[in-house]
Amino acid sequence: MNASRSLGAGLGLKAEHYAESLDCQDAGLWFEVHPENYMLGGARLAWLQRVAQRHPLSLHGVSLSLAADAPPRAEHLQRLRTLIDKVQPALVSEHLAWSTWRGQYHPDLLPFPRSSEAMIRITDNIQRTQDALGRRIAIENPSHYLHLPGHDWEEIDFLSELAKRSGCGLLLDINNVYVSAHNLDFDAARYLERFPAADIMEIHLAGHSRDADARLLIDSHDSPIDDQVWALYHHLIQRIGPRPTLIERDDQIPAFTTLMAERNKAQSILDQAGAAP
């Protein structure tokens, strides 16, 4: 199945919405989860398997630490492969970040200098991951809060080359682009115009907030999607055509109907682009 052509707009699957998610019959609807929450089995996995019988799934990892100084742990990859075999997700993705370094774990998705050395290391880690999982994965563009020294590559060039060398796809998070553009003072629309559209397997939309002194935007996933993020998304889809699109909300979770309203707005944009001659 070509997920890019069969999936519409989806939602992050939340425990408080399990029953409504299971019963919803909207065309093109799919759900995304962090696989780490389901790898150990039990009641969570049993429910996810029930949802998978009715809706396509996407697994969005947060702990492979692909930019780390060591390959992903073999036991973690095996657990992830087992979960994939059980629920047969349409998409699998990870972040372009690191969480472990020199054997120490840090509970965050951390940035790194886009050096040529990092390119070689991350390419190898992605290839190892794809070989272990038996499928192509998508890598998400990060959000940025400060200028980091030591870059040999611009971000878009790095992502494009990473996809070329490893064979991975890309997950384009438009809120990450908007947040980073504000914090690092670049043009979000221009960034999206240059983004390698052919490699986009999935798109994320989310809300953001401001830090205490209101200078930085924070990729907080705790509020409705900003109007300017919607505008960037609409323009992108008009240009490149429909792609699977996820509405992310990870804090201040509203009612299922509220999230579905945002989901339906994204679906309408996808439908309009799909119907265009």
Image (cartoon, rainbow, N blue to C red):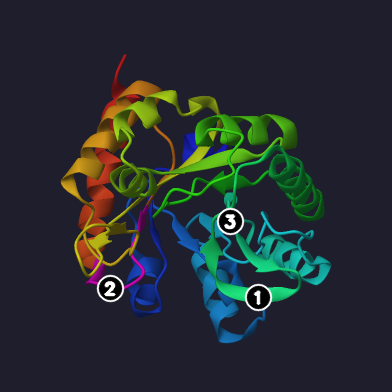
Please state if 271 lies on the left or on the right of 134 as rendered: left
Q: Is residue 117 above or below residue 32?
A: above
Give the residue type at disc 2.
Ile
Q: Nearer the viewer, residue 26 or 108?
A: 108
Q: Which mark is residue 97?
A: 3
Q: Nearer the viewer, residue 82 or 171?
A: 171
Mark 1 or mark 2: whose residue is earlier in sequence? 1
What's the magenta region? 247-256
**Label 1 Cα neighbours within 10 Å, binned few <14 / some 14-19 / many ≥20:** few
**Label 3 Cα neighbours within 10 Å, binned few <14 / some 14-19 / many ≥20:** many
Q: Which residue is mark 2?
A: 253
Q: Is residue 25 above or below residue 234?
A: below
Residue 99: name its quadrant: bottom right
Mark 3 or mark 2: whose residue is earlier in sequence? 3
Q: Are marks 1 and 2 in contact (CB under 8 Å)?
A: no
Q: Is residue 50 visible?
A: yes
Q: Main secondary structure of the magenta part?
A: loop
Measured as percent of width and height from the top left, residue 85 is found at: 72, 61
Q: Is residue 241 visible?
A: no
